[in-house]
Image (cartoon, rainbow, N blue to C red):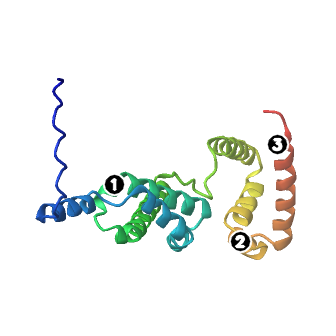
Amino acid sequence: MPVIAPMPAARPARIPSQRDGADAESTAAAGTTVDHLTETYRAHYRSLLGLAALLLDDTASCEDVVQEAFIRVHSARKRVRDPEKTLAYLRQTVVNLSRSALRRRILGLKLLSKPMPDMASAEEGAYDQLERDSLIRAMKGLQRRQREVLVLRYFADMTEAQVAETLGISLGSVKAYGSRGIAALRVAMEAPA
């Protein structure tokens, strides 16, 4: 007759022990779940965006910061031991990322070279120098009295009466020397070099 193997005895029901409590703690220590994090993110996206908007100035940066916060908390979700603190982690990450974005902007603004508003370009400076040189040559070609009247009147910014008194000539002579000097300068400046 064939030998029949005895049936294995039924396993006794497991009695919960202290070790089961430790397993529950290790599960909680494993961090928040992806589903819980995603639900929290979806439910509080607008408030996180509003928080970023209070710290930053443009909408695109706010959206980037909030999305980056989700990614960072997602990758570090095992450190979020209490799932109820998931929103707090998201908020703190939004604040930290906003601060970093502002620091980068400020640093970028400091590093940008700022052109001097009144400073002429090198080409303009060279052109001005050429004009000054030709003006000085033309002034040297004037009669002595014409040159004196023009220098005192236009470069020293004196009135015609002050020029007349300084040179010891009449007001009419100042006007005559001035107009003849300007006409001679115009001809000298327009002549090819």
**Residue at the spot 75% in from the left edge and 72% down from the top edge:** 164
Q: Secondary structure at mark 3?
A: helix
> Which is nearer the N-term, disc 1 or disc 3?
1
Residue 158, disc: 2
Task: Say whether residue 10 is visible.
Answer: yes
Task: Say whether residue 56 is visible.
Answer: no
Q: Alpha-carbon distance for marks 1 and 3?
A: 80 Å
> Which is nearer the N-term, disc 2 or disc 3?
2
**Residue at the spot 53% in from the left edge and 57% down from the top edge:** 64
Q: Position of residue 108 (x, y in %)?
A: 48, 54
- Tag 3 residue: 188
Q: Nearer the viewer, residue 109 or 17?
A: 17
Q: Which circle, 2 or 1, is nearer the viewer?
A: 1
Q: Secondary structure at mark 2?
A: loop
**Residue at the spot 65% in from the left edge and 44% down from the top edge:** 129
- As drawn, is 146 to the left or to the right of 133? right
Q: Position of residue 46 (x, y in %)?
A: 57, 70
Q: Which circle, 1 or 3, is nearer the viewer?
A: 1
Q: Position of residue 49 (x, y in %)?
A: 55, 68
Q: Nearer the viewer, residue 11 or 24?
A: 11
Res 192 quadrant in image: top right
In this rendering, the answer to whether 93 lies above or below 138 is below
Q: Nearer the viewer, residue 58 or 155?
A: 58
Q: Alpha-carbon distance for marks 2 and 1?
A: 78 Å
Residues at circles 1 and 3 in contact by the CB criterion of under 8 Å: no
Q: Amino acid at mark 2?
A: Met
Task: Judge the density around disc 3: few (<14), some (14-19), many (≥20) Cα neighbours within 10 Å.
Answer: some
- As drawn, is 108 to the left or to the right of 187? left
- Tag 1 residue: 76
Q: Amino acid at mark 1?
A: Ala
Task: Judge the density around disc 2: few (<14), some (14-19), many (≥20) Cα neighbours within 10 Å.
Answer: some
